């Protein structure tokens, strides 16, 4: 099955994502009292072999920690992948006024807190605009202090080609950055395209 | 005479959504711009007495447009329509002289409310 999106659909996905990531950034900005820099999101059809490249492109740092969270609803399923640059944790701990020792466990706590805000708000924003509803599964830690290569290897991809939405978040004046990747299952693309077409009509 | 209204956004979907949100029967002449530079040029030509302005755009972003409007002392009522709704973004555009800030996605209700609030849309 070939997965395709038209230029109009890509533009619409980009705009919808733009609004959703803005809502997520607003939550984070109010929580941490910072300004989140928002670049233009990337919308791509990628193959499983390209996922590696998408991730490499998203984050060049050597050590990362990552959380993934599945979502399903309205005939659409996918996974949200949040990849954190490990260098971010020090500044993040200060911002969150985290008082415990910043060890493995402390970082895990920060990782889970930030991912629940970013993933939740972003998925909600996208679903709302497309008049869909997603239920979120439990977040799973894919790895801490690992290399991006290991993250991809550990994934068991059931798809060959799919729709990927890539969002880069950066906090102004601080060393905090992360990437949120939304991957839809191959079977979901037709359905989500249909919702986009309703909007474009 | 029809009121010149400019819609400045890099997304064609967003421009369409904005146009659709404008009140029906409002006597206007709509111009579209796909980035800040185009938008600024249209305002210079008098095509944007009322401007719906996006913030994140290539070439020149919404902040750049606002700065230039101020520098050149152009006559335009700017309503920023943005996906970036952080408190800082709202404060920055207001300090740069924008009249109002509306959260995306825009709809008819929000557009009518803001236009009425600032007396751009009269009941007559």
Image (cartoon, coloured by chain):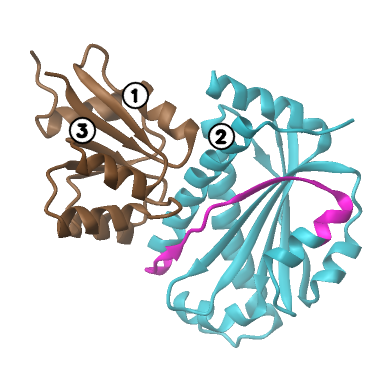
Say whether residue A200 is visible: yes
Q: Is residue B81 visible?
A: no
User: What is the x, y in percent for residue B17?
Assistant: 42, 27
User: How many angstroms separate mark 2 from mark 1 (CA)?
Assistant: 16 Å
Q: Nearer the viewer, residue B47 or A72?
A: B47
Image position of A172 (left or right of A192): left
Residue at x-position 24% and y-position 54%: B66
The residue under label 2 is A12
Disc 2 packing (10 Å; few <14; some 14–19; many ≥20): many
> Is residue B22 positioned above or below A18 on the image?
above
Total number of numbered labels? 3
> In whole angstroms, how far apart are the C-alphas of marks 2 and 3?
25 Å
Q: Colour of chain A?
A: cyan
Horizontally, residue B67 falls left or right of residue A157, namely left
Question: In this figure, which residue is indicated by the disc labeled 1?
Answer: B21
Chain letter matching colour brown: B
User: Where, by quadrant of the figure, is residue B68 drawn?
Assistant: bottom left
Chain assignment, label 2: A
Task: State whether residue A25 is above or below residue A160.
Answer: below
Query: Relative to A5, does residue A69 appear above or below in the rendering?
Result: below
Q: Secondary structure at mark 3?
A: helix
Residue A199 disc label = none
Mark 3, residues whose alpha carbon is within 10 Å: few (<14), some, or many (≥20)? some
Q: Place residue B78 in its image quadrant.
A: top left
Residue linked to disc 3: B114
Q: Are marks 2 and 1 on the same chain?
A: no
Q: Are marks 2 and 3 on the same chain?
A: no
Image quadrant where one finds the C terminus of chain A: top right
Residues rendered magenta in the picture: A31-52
Q: Is residue A39 magenta?
A: yes
Q: Residue at x 27, y 39 (%)?
A: B42
């Amino acid at each position: 099955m070939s997965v395709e999106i038209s230029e109009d659909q890509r533009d619409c996905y980009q705009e919808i994502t733009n609004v959703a990531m803005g809502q997520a950034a607003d939550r984070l900005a109010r929580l941490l009292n910072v300004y989140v820099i928002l670049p233009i999101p990337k919308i791509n059809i990628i193959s499983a072999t390209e996922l590696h490249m998408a991730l490499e492109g998203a984050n060049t740092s050597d050590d990362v920690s990552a959380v993934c969270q599945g979502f399903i609803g309205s005939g659409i399923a996918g996974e949200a992948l949040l990849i954190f640059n490990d260098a971010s944790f020090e500044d993040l701990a200060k911002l969150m006024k985290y008082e415990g020792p910043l060890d493995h466990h402390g970082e895990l706590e920060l990782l889970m807190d930030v991912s629940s805000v970013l993933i939740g708000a972003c998925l909600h924003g996208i679903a709302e605009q497309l008049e869909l509803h997603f239920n979120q599964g439990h977040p799973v830690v894919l790895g801490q202090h690992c290399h991006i290569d290991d993250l991809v290897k550990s994934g068991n991809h059931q798809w060959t080609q799919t729709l990927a939405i890539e969002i880069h978040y950066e906090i102004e004046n601080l060393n905090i950055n992360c990437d949120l990747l939304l991957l839809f299952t191959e079977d979901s693309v037709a359905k989500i395209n249909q919702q986009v077409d309703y909007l474009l009509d | 005479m029809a009121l010149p209204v400019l819609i400045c956004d890099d997304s064609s979907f967003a421009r369409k959504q904005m146009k659709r949100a404008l009140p029906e029967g409002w006597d206007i002449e709509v111009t579209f711009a796909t980035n800040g530079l185009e938008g600024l040029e249209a305002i210079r030509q008098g095509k944007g007495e009322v401007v719906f302005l996006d913030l994140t755009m290539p070439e020149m972003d919404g902040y750049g447009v606002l700065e230039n409007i101020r520098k050149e002392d152009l006559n335009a009522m700017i309503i920023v329509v943005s996906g970036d709704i952080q408190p800082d973004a709202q404060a920055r555009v207001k300090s740069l002289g924008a009249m109002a800030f509306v959260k995306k996605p825009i709809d008819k209700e929000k557009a009518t409310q803001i236009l009425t609030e600032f007396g751009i849309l009269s009941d007559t």
